[in-house]
Structures are given as C-alpha cells and as structure tokens.
Image (cartoon, rainbow, N blue to C red):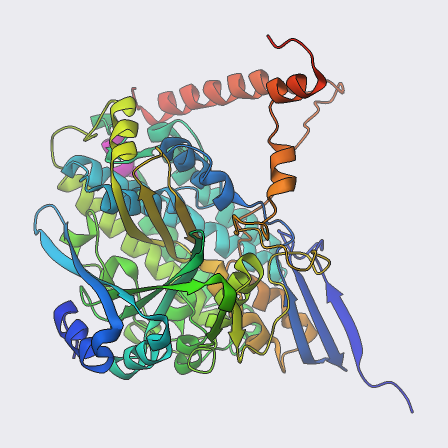
Amino acid sequence: MAKTTYYVPIGPIHPALKEPIRVEAEVEGEKIVKVDVKRGFAHRGIEYMGMKRNAIQTLYLSERICGICSISHPYAFVIGSEKALGIEAPPRAQYIRSIIAELERIHSHILWLGVIAHEIGFDSLLFWTWKGREKVLDILEAITGNRINYSMYMIGGVRRDLKESHIRALKDMITYYWEFTEHMKEVFLSDPVYEARTRGVARVPKDVALKLNLVGPVARAAGLRMDIRQDIPYDAYADIDVKAVVPQDIVGEARGDAYDVTMVRIYEIEQSLDIIEYCIDNLPEGRILTIPNYIALLNKIKKTEGEGIGAHEAPRGEVIHYFRYDGTRDGPAVWKVIAPSYNNINSWAYCLLGAEVADIPVVVGYIDPCMCCNDRIAVVKDSTGKMLDYSYIHKKAIEKTRMLEKELGVRR
Amino acid sequence: MTLTAEEIFDRLKEELGDAILNYELKEYKMGVKKPRTYKEVWMEIDKSAFRRAIEAIFKIDYPHLHFITGEDIGEAIRMIYSFGLFHEHPWGEVSIVIKFDLPKNELILPTITDLMMGAETNEREIREMLGVEFDGLKNKRHLFLPDDWPEGKYPWRKDEYGVDDMIKHTHKSVKEIRKERGEQSG
C-alpha cells in the first residue's frame, strides 16, 4: 500500500525560526495531521545561576533572559523583590519605570509586525517597519545608554533620571508614532493579501485560550480581557486605569486568529503612546532610588525573610517571577521565572492540527515566540579580517550614543 | 461579579476546613496619585487536601495558572501553586498561592491537566526537575532536559538525586584545584 503521510521535521535550526525549537509535523498532502513540539534546546539554567548570586547580580542576569524585551524580566524581578522585602519605589521612579516599559512595548510590537510580514513573504514591509522602530530604539538609547539590556531598573527605583531634554524627545516621538501607526493600520489591516494569509490562520477560540492558559496579545486576540496592567495594576498603571485591548472593542468581534493578533498589537502601540504621554505630563518630582547605597540594599536583603510574586505585562504577555529570600544570603533562595512563551507555545499544537504546511511560519510566528534562552556568542570581523573586540565595539557604541544625543538635542 | 480576597478565602475555608494549616492575606499598596491596596491569599495546606483545594478554586471561577514550582527543603519538597482568579476584571484579580510539603518517600500528586490543559507544561517541568510524579499526566516526555538525560537525576534537587557532583566539578576554583594537586596557592 502506498504511504499516505509524510514526516516534516522543522528545527531546531531552521531558516524560518529565529531561535532553536523543534516542530515535528506529520502531513497528509498539504494538511497537518499530527504535531509534536520539542523545546529546551537553549535551556541555560538561569534560575540556578541566579540562586548562586546576590540580588543585584541576579537582576542584571534576569535582563539577559530575553534578548528583545530586556526590561520585562527586571520589571517583574524588582516588583517581586520589593514585595518580598517590603521596599517601595519613589513615585518618580515608578513613573520612569512605566515609561521605559511602554517604550519597550512599542519597539517589541513593531519588531513583531516586521517578523510576521517576513514570515508571509513581505520583506519590504519588514524593512519599513524596522526602519520605523529605530526611532524608539534611539530614544531608549538616549535615556538609558543602551539599545538593548538597558540596566535601568534597581530594587527600589531606577538608576537614571529623566531630563527635560529627554521629555522633549519623547514628545517628538509620540507625534511621530501616531502618524506611523496610522500607516501601519493601512498596510497591515487594509491589505487584502495580508488578510488572506492571516485570517483564520492560528485560530484560537476564547474557551480554548482559557484552557490552554494563554497570555498576552494572543489571549486578548481570542477575546479574553486579561492584562496585568489592568488586573493587578502597579506603578504608574495604577493611576491610569489601563484597559485591555481586545478585538471586540475595535471591530465588534474576536476571532482569535493571526489577523486579530496583528490588530491588537497595533492598537496597543497607540495605547502605549497614551500611557507615555500621561506619565510625562504627570511625572512626579523627587528622588529615584529608595536605598541609593547598594551595599546597604544587599545588607537589607541579607536580613530580610520574605517571599513575593512579581508580575509584569510584557509585550508578549505576562512575566511572573516568584521569590523567596531566606534571610541568610543576599540573593534569592528560590527564584522561578515564567515567560509568556512558556504558556503560549501550548497553542501551537492546537493551531497546527488541520492547518496547511505553508501556514506553519505564521502559526509559529504569531505568538512572537521567544525561547528566552538564546546563546549569545558572536565573533565579528571587519573587512580586513581583524577581530572586533569588546573595547572597540564599546567605543563605537558610546560614539553612536553621543551622536544620537546631539541629533535629538538631548543633553546628559 | 468578582469576590474580594477575604471572600475567596472564606469560601476556601468552608471547603477545606482544618486542612488549611496556615494562611496570610498579604496587602500591598499600589499607585501614586490614586493609591489603592490589593491583597493576595497565601495558604499552607495539608497535602491530602490538594485536589480538594484545586477543585474549590475552580468552583469559584475558572482561574489562570500563574506557575507551579517547587523547592527542595531537605526531607521534603515544598510545592508552590499560584493561581489568578477573576483575571478579566480591572483591579479584580486575586492571586492565590497554595503551598504544601511533599515527603520525599511519596513524591506523587494528582494532575490538574484534566481541569486545565495548559498546566501540562508546568507539570512536565516539575516532573523532570524535581522528580515529582503526576498521577494522570498523559504526556510524560521531558520538556527542557534532553531525551537521553540520565534516569533519577533531577537538576533542582539538592540531595543525592541532584546533579551536585557535576556542578561541584564545574564550579571548582583555581585555589581548590591547586590545593588538590598539592601546589602552593597564591
């Protein structure tokens, strides 16, 4: 008898995947009849490493869990730590934290929009969106000194203050992105080809999303009004009354497919702009750190026994950190990290069953997967074959920051 | 309609009774201009009441599972389950944390995947990292560890079932290595 099904292994290393994960599909013609997802190809045991270090070192380590949303994990970390230790951040620091988190949401969502355009073959759209993303990365660099891994948050506050010039640059940025999102709505949501490729693909109904424990834009696209900024508000969000962005509020109906996820993400960029605007208009005065001396902070941690859960609504969904400080060490005794993709990958097997082979990249891409554990070793050589070492790259990075500060009229 | 942390705790108290060994309603202040408080329920229960506690939570509202984690505390494994109830309501979500100790000679728990499919990932992780068996869990393959990981070695365990010999080796300092070789340190 002729064989009717074929086995299609995708990954762990595959051009369509940015990070290592394996999707094993069994296909019958074009239809997928059986799926298996294997993960853990880049598991680095970060939680174990964190339990061997002091809390401030672990905070920086948590920033390196994810390569793109590098503020999400520190945010959950500082909130959880503050709850466990009974520290409160000063009002100004709370507002600055929320501004940085929203800037990050803008850049992460635009990045995703580029990625999904690339997955379905619109590379010019990828370049256009990523060009637009540079503006927010420039602002982040001007404020924090880095394009990624900002080292901005600290238990009980932030490490850098916002200057008048930063606020001016932020206002410019807000005007720029209001225009940019209008364009994005046109090119993504009104494009017939984009709609044809994403409508009905990766469809998750509301009840299934609830049972699969999905989080973030993926759950909201399915119609679940869940958003940590709304359900358990913290920092500046507690003053703003954030409302979860769901498709039923925008078009009257939630279908939970890749098209709805796109819509949710674009409208969330607008929401972020509103939040940033509120924060800079109402930025409280005062100090930015509760315990400015890090030795004193570590000493306090060493003497405090307590546990706490920190939750932050990252661009991809909720990030949860659980802590226990045992009062004998200056680091966490237990540290558990839940990243959004941990839950959202559950939806792949559901969405891929019965889908077509060509939809695999869209299904894989629509949750914005982040294995949270990429190895980051790169050897860079210039055209003469000379190795570009750390000091050279660092020098270049500082030069770029100074150039940007000049361009944006920002003074440090 | 949402319930407050106290009301939720009262309901759980009704269902579980004496099985609640210890509890705390933790209160936090959030917000700058409009400060409000919100509460979390932290409970320590008897392990025999675990399934009843989960069912009681599901009876109140379909929860959102935050995480399942565990800690090796010597003679037992302390399991920590965290759920969010009323997660679709502004300021309404109440976190419930359930903790209990599992003695190391009977590391077995009923699964909750029959109530919530999405818990499978969490249970598989705990199973491979701490060696806790879940009764009724269908997919028992490794989640993060490689398929050829040695049997009976659990990375989060701190006893003889952990991977301490390997870790000790990788974390040996230069000083220790020199001492072993009989060289003069410094």
Q: Could you tell me if residue B107 is visible in this image?
A: no
x and y percent of residue A198 in the render? 53, 71
| Quadrant, the C terminus of chain A | top left
x and y percent of residue A310 in the render? 31, 51
Q: Nearer the viewer, residue B124 or A357?
A: B124
**Total label count?**
0
Q: Residue at x 20, y 63 (%)?
A: B23
Q: Nearer the viewer, residue B24 or A92?
A: B24
- A227 displayed left or right of B156: left
- A298 displayed left or right of A334: left
Quarter of the image holding residue A290? Answer: top left
- B152 displayed left or right of A46: right
Q: Residue at x 63, y 79 (%)?
A: A355
- B167 displayed left or right of B23: right
Q: Nearer the viewer, residue A262 or A21?
A: A21
Q: Residue at x 12, y 29 (%)?
A: A286
> Does the magenta stretch mainly form a helix, a strand or a loop?
helix
| A138 shown above or below B17 | above
Task: Please give the range of residues in magenta.
Answer: A166-172
| B11 shown above or below B157 | below
x and y percent of residue A373 in the render? 56, 47
